[in-house]
Image (tube, rainbow, N blue to C red):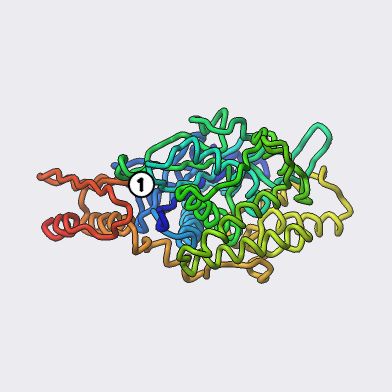
Amino acid sequence: MQRRIFGLENEYGLISSASGGRVNLSVESALGYLFEKVVSRQRGTNDFLRNGARLYQDTGCHPEYATPECDNALDLTVHDKAGERIIEELLVSAERKLRENGIDCDIFIFKNNTDSVGNTYGCHENYLVERGVNFHKLAEQMIPFLVTRQVFAGAGKVLKTRLGNHYYISQRAQHIYQEISGATTSSRGIINTRDEPHADEEKYRRLHVIVGDSNMSELATYLKVGTTAIVLALVEDGCIRKDLALEDPVRAIKEISHDTTCRRKVRLKRGKEFSAIELQREYLELALEYYATAEASPQVSDLLERWQGVLERLSEEPMALHRELDWVIKRELIGTYMAKKGIGFDDQRISMLDLQYHDIRRDRGLYYALCRQELVERVATDAMIEEATTTPPQTTRAKIRADFVRFANERNKSYDVGWSYLKLNDRYQRTILCKDPFKSSDPRVDEMIGSA
């Protein structure tokens, strides 16, 4: 399946803070203020937005943003960033409302994966996969790739251990306990067995990946989802002819995360040992061989080139990627600060700096301070991201949903919406199933809108 449907779900960390003896606002209350502007009364803290995305309250009082369906890695990267902008706007509105109500309290929202006491929340990736592909074979061939791609997709983390604080490549790696699992909040697997394709279930299944970090870097997100889709194409077409299965993937993902030189070798079931970069190169070589005879879109060609370039530079000196990859950008930032202040990783200021990198407020977050100084590479523009906050992808089912939501809100119509259905709550109680996520128009929906 060369054209694929992608989606990202990001759970955001939220805290409220007060000083000078003021009483903190509870997280539940802060979340209520956050959702007040956007959420309709009939759907509570769960709503589809005018860009086709979904915003809702997840377990543990996390705001969660699920992108609209995208059919390429760049669109998905842009819409993932649009989620940050939408939540940032809600944050600013919530703080304004707090001030109006006489509550002097700040709300902080972070696009990361761990809190100060060791809890984790996720960035879940969704890929539509052909139903005919054997799931266990797919998992077996994808897991070594997913374990090792953290060398370019990790977000970086200062982690407290009994031997002191250390800097690791990935935030989620420490919280993965199984290869395959049905759980997302306990006994987490590299691949989750949830199979809700929100599409024709006879044709498609959903590959639900919960091992990845939330990325601030646009390039890291682009590579993360783009290379995963490329490897999926190889799996679907039976082109993974090498045995790359790891002896212990759960141990390997942690060992790789602990080594910022990217040279640590992990053992395969067949006895050989590879570093994460070497395993990634195995997949890259298979992809280059595959696309030497198969047609590659300009975006796939760009991804292959970037993938190859990043692996080459990582093998030479990981810190050379301090403009591109989150874990390296943040490590460089922390290293510079430690050298200036003469402190080490155990200093509390370093943990705070680690967290502030992920603050989504552009006037406060350290990632965005680097953006303003043009110290990070980007793959999107601010204009592209701003447009995506209100405009859905034009080539997927998200456009149908967004057009319907816009119509219903403009006409003040009561409605219900899901990923694969639209319902107008009028005297006819019309419901339309939209089972094909590749379709961007539907005459039945056009007729319903035209006749309402």
Q: Residue at x 59, y 67 (%)?
A: 378
SS for callout 1: strand
Left or right, 333 with respect to 184, comes to: right
**x and y percentages locating residue 276 in the rendered image:** 70, 48
Q: Specify whether residue 188 is in view.
A: yes
Quarter of image, res 361: bottom right
| Percent x, y of residue 438 | 32, 56
82 versus 272 height, above or below: below
Q: Residue at x 82, y 37 (%)?
A: 164
Q: How many discs mark residues in the rendered view?
A: 1
Quadrant that contains the C terminus: bottom left
The amino acid pointed to by label 1 is Asp
Return the x and y of residue 351 as percentages of the image width and height.
Answer: 74, 46
Residue assigned mark 1:
47
* Percent x, y of residue 115: 64, 39
How packed is label 1: few (under 14 Cα within 10 Å), some, or many (20 or more)?
many
